[in-house]
Every structure is written in C-alpha cells, then in structure tokens.
Amino acid sequence: MPEKKLDITLVITRLDAGGSAEVTLLLAKGLSQKGHNVTLITGKTANPPFDVCEFAAKNGFAIIEIKELIRNINPLLDIIALIKLYFLFKKLKPDIIHTNTSKAGILGRLAGKIARFSNIVHSPHGHIFYGYYHPTITSLFIAMEKLMAKYTKYILNLTHLGKKDHIRKKIGKPEKFIVTGCGIDLKRFTNVQKRKNQKFTITWIGRLTEIKNPFLLLHAVALLNKKGYNFTYKVIGDGELLNKCKEYAKKNELENVHFYGYQSEVEKFLARSDVLTVTSNNEGFGRVIVEAMAAGVPIIATKVGGIPELIKHNVNGILITPGSAEELCAGILRLYTESNLRENFIKYNKKFCLKFDISNYISKIEEIYRKVLNE
C-alpha cells in the first residue's frame, strides 16, 4: 500500500542567498517531486539567489511571503507575523510544520502551538550561540529556544557539534535532537569540467561579513605577496564588508585580488580554482566546503563550528587556527608545492561528499516526518 502523501508547510525567515535558503528551496522541490503538497512561507527577501517564485512554480510548490517576518527583533512586526502565521496554519491544515532558522523557528512554532498543531520540527541551520548576535540577543534566543523546544517534536541539527551545543544549553532532552547533515545538489559541481589556470588560483566564497572574516585572506595575500608569491585570488560574494575589503586591497596594492560580487553559478569559479579558503570565525556547517569537495578543489579552513566534522587535518584538507594569517599562508604554500597532497585530498573528498547529496537529505527528512506522524 502506497504511503500517504503529506501536506507540508515549511517556514523560513528569508530566502536571501545563503546555505539555509538554498537547502530549504531544494527540500521544497524534492518533497514536491515526491508527490507531497508543499507550501513554503518566507519573510521579505531582499537578495534571493534567483527568482524563487519562478522556481516554485516550475517545481510544483507554493510560496507565501509575510513581509513582517524579518530577521531582527521588532515587537510590532513580530506580533503581526505571528498572527499571519496562525491564520495561514489554520487555513493550510498541514500534516507537518517544519520551521527553519531562528526567527521563523520561534514565531512559527509559537503560532503552530497556538493553532493547536503538534507535529512540528525545527532546523536551526547553524550555531546561533556564537558570534552572530549581541550577547543579550543571544541570551534571549536561548531562552526562547528552551520554551519553543517544548512545542517541537524534533530539532534537526546540521552537525554533531550543533546537537551537543543545544543539549549543553539545556534547550531540550537529548532524544529530541537528530543530526541530519545538509543537502547539496552535488551534480552542479561534479558535472563542471575542471580547467587549468595560468597562475595558481585561490578562491574565497561567501558573505563578506564579520563572522566570515574575509580580511584573514587579504592579510595572508599581503604576506605572500611580500614573499614574492604572485598567486591569483578570487573573492566571490556580497556583504557589508565588500567595500572595506576593496579599499584594503587597493591601499595595500593587492592587485592580484579580484572581487566578483555575488555569483549564482559558483561551480564555474570552483572549476577554475586550485584551492578554496574558508576563513570563518564560526561556521554552522560549511556548505561551500562540500561543494568544493564535489568540484575536486582542495580546502584550507579554520577549525571552527562544524568544519572539523567535514575536514580532518592532513587527511582530506588543512585546518588552521581562526585569525591566523601565518597558518593560512603556510597552508597555501603547502598545497602549492605538494601536488601529491592536493591529489590525495581530492580523491578522498570525491567519495566523502556523496553522503551529503540532496537526494539523501530529502529521504532522511521525509523519514523524520513519517516518524513524527506515527508517534
């Protein structure tokens, strides 16, 4: 007997370009293609990775925008968003409510509780406890997470560290947490043909924000240039530090650093990369690391957040101390001079990354939904 097709409502704070938005959109697409009735509720989005409405229409799921659902705390708008979520849940009558990211997780679960829905799961999509918010805001989020956990069947963590952090903060009982990993469309990266570069090319991909610490790469470039290593550096991404990074590069005559802004097809840049650098001060998962693995690009990354669950030092990549330009320089020079090491990393990662394919992730999430409904 075929299993029942589900009515699923996903809620996310915003669909701006980034890992949480991308995996939620891919989840909506995958669940819809499996025959489920999927509705994705999102807050106002300023910089979507692509035309999300067109993507939804093409892939058979609905998108509803609540403009009052925003990332920052705003009591008036938060109350309006809560009320709108309540009435949407009453109208949609979903079998499962799956909230994603902090703000949508708090308001979505509270609205679900008020509307008397009990089948609720939540995905935090990262380590919100370190470096993302002011300490006062972080404390408030932790208090709210403890309360909302009471109305949540399962909390789905990207990493084992994320699970441990939630348990350590006493947000819920250990049995409430499930490590799902992240879902990535690996074919995008494995199907792109690698191209050789005239110069050794180091790539940085992400949001140019304090938490991502792009200046660490620029400091390393300055040191390497002084030593006479004129490599090519490509910085892919937008963010509030973009102009400051450009100013720093100009002031320090880092003419071999090229800024490309946001790019929707990062796989094309990875295809022309010899090394990916990840310089974050904190990282919930490190999605771009898995993308680089699939594309056959060796990785140097800071030893923070969930990254050590992806990279084992000297086994499939190089881990460095956060903030250490000297260690980043040493890592770049090591990969530049040791071609066998690069090849060993690439060979290992081509197999390792397969478990993060989006199809595996969708099946895992669907299995969790069934588990919730059968309890």
Image (cartoon, rainbow, N blue to C red):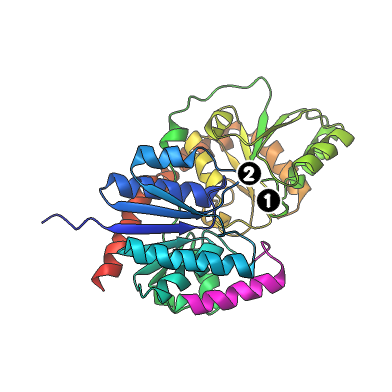
Residue 172 vs residue 3, the one in the foreground = 3
Question: Main structural element of the magenta stretch: helix, strand or loop?
Answer: helix
Residue contact between numbered discs 2 and 1, judged by CB atoms under 8 Å: yes
How far is mark 2 from mark 1, CA to CA? Answer: 7 Å
Q: Which residue is depicted at the point 64% across and 56% down?
A: 303
Q: Secondary structure at mark 1?
A: helix
For the question of whether residue 197 can be seen, the reply is: yes
Q: Position of residue 246 (x, y in %)?
A: 80, 37
Q: Position of residue 164 (x, y in %)?
A: 52, 71
Q: Identify which amino acid the numbered label 1 is placed on.
A: Lys
Q: Is residue 113 above or below residue 68?
A: below
Q: Which residue is depicted at the point 14% across and 54% down?
A: 2
The residue indicated by pointer 2 is 206
Magenta span: 130-148
Left or right: residue 236 versus residue 68 is right
Work out whether mark 2 precedes mark 1 in sequence or the reverse, and give the earlier one: 2
Q: Is residue 291 above or below residue 303?
A: above
Which quadrant, please, contains the C terminus?
A: bottom left
Crowd class of label 1 (few under 14; some 14 to 19; many from 20; radius 10 Å): some
Residue 230, magenta (yes or no): no
For the question of whether residue 183 can be seen, the reply is: no
Left or right: residue 284 versus residue 131 is left
Q: Identify which amino acid the numbered label 2 is placed on.
A: Gly
Q: Which residue is depicted at the point 41% across and 57% down?
A: 10
Residue 136, magenta (yes or no): yes
The residue indicated by pointer 1 is 212
Determine the image quadrant of residue 121: bottom left
Left or right: residue 155 versus residue 60 is right
Determine the image quadrant of residue 338: top right
Residue 306 vs residue 368, the one in the foreground = 368
Q: Position of residue 314 (x, y in %)?
A: 58, 48
Crowd class of label 2 (few under 14; some 14 to 19; many from 20; radius 10 Å): many
